[in-house]
Image (cartoon, coloured by chain):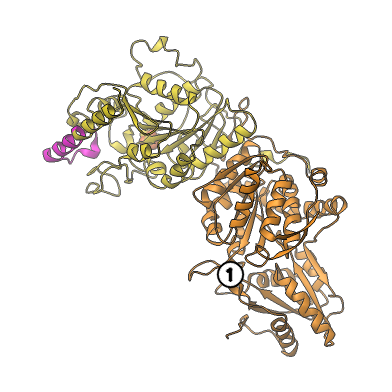
Amino acid sequence: MKENDHIETISRDVARTAGEKGRLDGLSLGEGATRAPLMAAKEYMRAGHMACPGCGEANTMRLILKVLGEKTIVVILPSCVGVISATYPNSTFAVPCFHSAFEIAAPTAAGIANALKLQGREDVTALAFAGDGGTFDIGLQSLSGAADRNENFIYVCLDNEGYMNTGIQSSSSTPEKAWTMTTPGGRRGRKKKFMQIIAAHRMPYAATASIGNPLDLMEKIRKAKEIKGMKFIHTLTPCPTGWRMPEDLTAKAAQLAVETKLFPLYEVIDGTEYRITHEPQGIPVAEYLKIQGRFKHFKPEDVERLQREVDEDWERLVAQTRLGGCI
Amino acid sequence: MRILLAGNYAVAEAVRLSRVKFVAAYPITPQTPIYEKLSDMENEGKLSGVMMRTESEHSAMAACISASLTGVRTFTATASQGLALMHEMLHFASGNRVPIVMTNVNRVISAPWAFGSDQSDSLSQRDTGWLQFYCEDAQEALDTVIQAYKIAEQVLLPIMVCIDGFFTSHFIEPVEIPDQETVDAFLPPFSVPTRFDIKEPAYITNVVNPEQYMGYRQRSFEDMEKARAVIREVNQEYKEIVGRGYDPVEAYDTEGADIVLATSGAMTSTARVAIENLKEKGYKAGLLKMKNFRPFPFEEVQAVLKDVPKVVVLDRNISLGKEGIWCQELKAALYPLERRPQVYGYIAGICGADVSPDMIEDMVTRALKSEQPEKLPVWVRRDG
Ligand code: SF4
């Protein structure tokens, strides 16, 4: 038997797609975007992928890959990303991609990072894309292990607040009282404060990011690329399908989440130093809720309760920022 | 160099000699000494790679898969519950066609909790697409791990090398350790290229349709079949270079025997003593040592047993609702023969329970005396 003649026996195909260069549409990047050195000319998310129209995940991945460029190996999981990345023989990604199993984004990326190190190929970034289910729930143990070992890769949580790929079921990231197919009367549990869990690992770099603020997101990815060790980026990725929302409201929902302080943008260095990277306008949370069908049963007291919680969390974050000594 | 060594340490030596670059592991009794020994080697600079101390066996296997796909030689070891926890990833490894070598130190699976040797952990992984080899002693374990890398990297399927917990894993025996130059002459550096080529980006483990999926399964099946020849060639080469070797089955005094005892793993050593005793007492008894479980050596088994009237299969495992697993496999291998031997199934040594030469002699003489095998396997227990 010849060496390597079995390589083709696994799904390995250079993808055929509608076009190498995807169209740059959807988001307005705001002033200065065209001058931003963060933006590579090339797209590494190809056009013709299989996301629902207006998918926040697809947009997030696209921006991230533009920053990381061609020397990237992407790990994905069974999730919406698994579907977005297309079926054989196509591939949405113009970089090598490995569709791993559900609960192991972190050790899979760590295995790649270690092998790259052994081969002296540390200029290549190992990048894991996992959903909230694969991060907050089933993948938490393996993520924690990788963080503890400070493995050298970037972990991006694409948080759409539910198991959207299997048809909108509740995860521990789903907001309290939100509608899903498994919480038709509203979820009882409260959304896990995941960044606190992450910070407790004291990894070199963790941050929240949003396509509502694409330059901030890309700057954080650029930083993460430079830092050795484990990097965690928590992105809130609006999902028109699961959030019961018109598909042209994705960017608006992402921006409202930030500007209402519901999803503040900040960084945590070594688990202790907090830094807010965008001063939110403080728009009422009701503005964010009302464009989404999953909250349509909310009573005024539900909105008030959430508003209180958001305000308290924000104050806590600001206090933490001061404790960390910088704002 | 010939030194006294426990089986677990012999495995660690084999990993070092195979120039493994990436080890990911999690401690579990009775595998832990392998992990500890490899850690010592790493600490002393004798291991030329990276050790990843994972938070679970599931993650250890996940990391071995992706590191292997990236293009480095990988190793892990586990046992019992750890192997059960890995189950999903075992399928994932063989489906991704990665040449990982793993040592499983056979240990009983709970409940109730216990720790002794029992092959049910690995035998119940038989349909995961891994090649499985069972070793009789520490020397065989060392040699088999080295051979396994050469086989796995040719057929692109992962290999599990099994040894019996607390027997082979912990018994201290004289072991001949080949020197590095000898092993280098036998085993080339890892030759499977990275599946993650930046210049020619590919999507590994894409979503496929049913026809395509079935095609991949068929390819894997065919390559498992091709492994039979590769195993023979590799063993032959190992014999030439290193001076020892092991066939998929070993037949001892089976020709013209009235009865043949079939065993696997460490119990084979005890069986050798029992067979000698029986022969001294005038019985025409032979021994069939079964080393390879996947691919199952059905042709070799047929060749040895085709003219034998009775076969006793000794199983240190049990498939509830059927019988011992080696017994099932052996019966299935004999089925195509026109004249089939009677097959007697005995269950003994579950969870490392004592199996002495006299107990084995009793099984053989009992089978010789009976007209035909009982419907259900016979349980042989000291307290029963
Ligand atoms: S269900 Fe939501 S997250 Fe999934 S592809 Fe559709 S829009 Fe994107």
Q: Ligand 1 appears in which quadrant? A: top left
B89 sits to left or right of A270: right
* Chain A drawing hue: yellow
A236 sits to left or right of B55: left
- Identify which residue, B336 or B61, lies in the foreground: B61
Furthest residue toward front: B44
Q: Chain of mark 1?
A: B
Where is residue B294 shown, x and y percent of the image? 69, 59
Q: Quadrant of residue A60?
A: top left
Find disc 1 in the rendering and name its residue: B116
Under circle 1, the secondary element is loop
Which residue occupies 45% across, 22% down? A222
Which residue occupies 42% across, 43% down? A134
- Identify which residue, A148 or B74, lies in the foreground: A148
Per the image, is A195 magenta?
no
Please provide the residue range marked out in magenta: A291-311
Q: Quadrant of the C terminus of chain B?
A: bottom right
With respect to residue B282, does B75 lie above or below?
above
B206 sits to left or right of A83: right
Which residue occupies 54% across, 21% down? A20
Q: Main secondary structure of the magenta part?
A: helix
With respect to residue A291, does B182 lie above or below?
below
Q: How many marks?
A: 1
Where is residue B190 shown, x and y percent of the image? 72, 40
Q: Who's orange, chain-wise? A: B
Query: Visible in this render: residue B318?
Result: no
User: Within 10 Å of the Cα at label 1, are there few (<14), some (14-19), or many (20+) other Cα atoms?
Assistant: many
Where is residue A68 shown, x and y percent of the image? 50, 23
Amino acid identity at mark 1? Gly
